[in-house]
Amino acid sequence: MAELKITKNELRNQQSKLNQLRKYLPTLQLKKALLQAEVSEARLEIYGLEEERDGEKRAVDDYASLFTQQIPCDVHHFTAIQHIYKRYENIAGAEVPFFEGADFAPITYDLFETPVWLEAGLAGIKAVSKLNAHIGVTREKLSILEHELREVTIRVNLFEKILIPRCEKNIKKIKVFLGDQQLAAVSQAKVAKAKILQREEGELHAY
């Protein structure tokens, strides 16, 4: 850290720096509050999706024993996600993903050659898979938001606990020093003036 210069120019520099820090801090604090709200919302969203997914799982469990039967089609093929759709939005400077949907392989088996329950069973498995994909994207969003929140929190703490107090301390130190110098100069001037007056009075008495 560079040594602090005890000058009027440095005082102006420190005051200008302090004004800039105080001007920018509210923006950082607002960004932090926004990210905190978004993080909380994402966590609640994940919780809700997991509850919904678990409900779908329980419904699919009713078909579990039926899927052990010989089925004339590949269940995994028709319930595997082929593509996940996302959109991205800028939140407080961070690009975060949002789940838009998912594609599955088109059903090509003959409905007349398969059990009547198969379509409902596949729909249940696909619903669970889609919810898992939704949860995955939302967790990705949460991770990005949490990272951004940590970074902003570090900057807010830096401003509040280090940079602003340091500037205030430097300004106070310079002001005290310059004030002492000014008092010393005034005192010296008074002493010099008193000596001059004393000398002048002495000269007058000499006449």
Image (tube, rainbow, N blue to C red):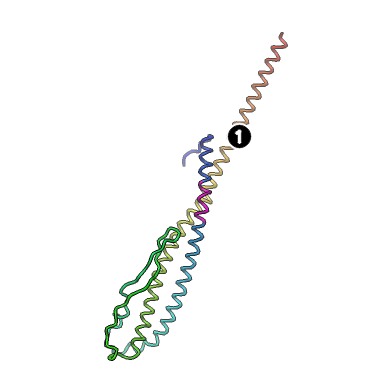
Residues shaded magenta: 20-29
Instruction: Report the side of 122 relative to 179 (left or right).
Output: left
Q: Name the quadrant of the C terminus.
A: top right
Splitting the image into 4 quarters, where does residue 117 fall? bottom left
Instruction: Report the side of 24 relative to 182 (left or right).
Output: left
Q: Magenta span has 17?
A: no
Per the image, label 1 sits on a secondary structure element best described as helix
Q: Residue at x 50, y 64 (%)?
A: 37
Splitting the image into 4 quarters, where does residue 112 fall? bottom left
Q: Magenta span has 22?
A: yes
Instruction: Report the side of 192 relative to 88 (left or right).
Output: right
* Residue sitting nearer the eye, 84 or 63: 84
x, y percent for residue 176 = 59, 37
Q: Residue at x 43, y 66 (%)?
A: 142
x, y percent for residue 77 = 29, 80
Splitting the image into 4 quarters, where does residue 93 fall? bottom left
Q: Circle 1 is placed at which residue position?
A: 179
Q: Residue at x 44, y 75 (%)?
A: 49
Instruction: Check the image and name the residue furthest to the top.
Output: 207
Name the amino acid type tagged 1.
Gly
* Residue sitting nearer the eye, 15 or 100: 100
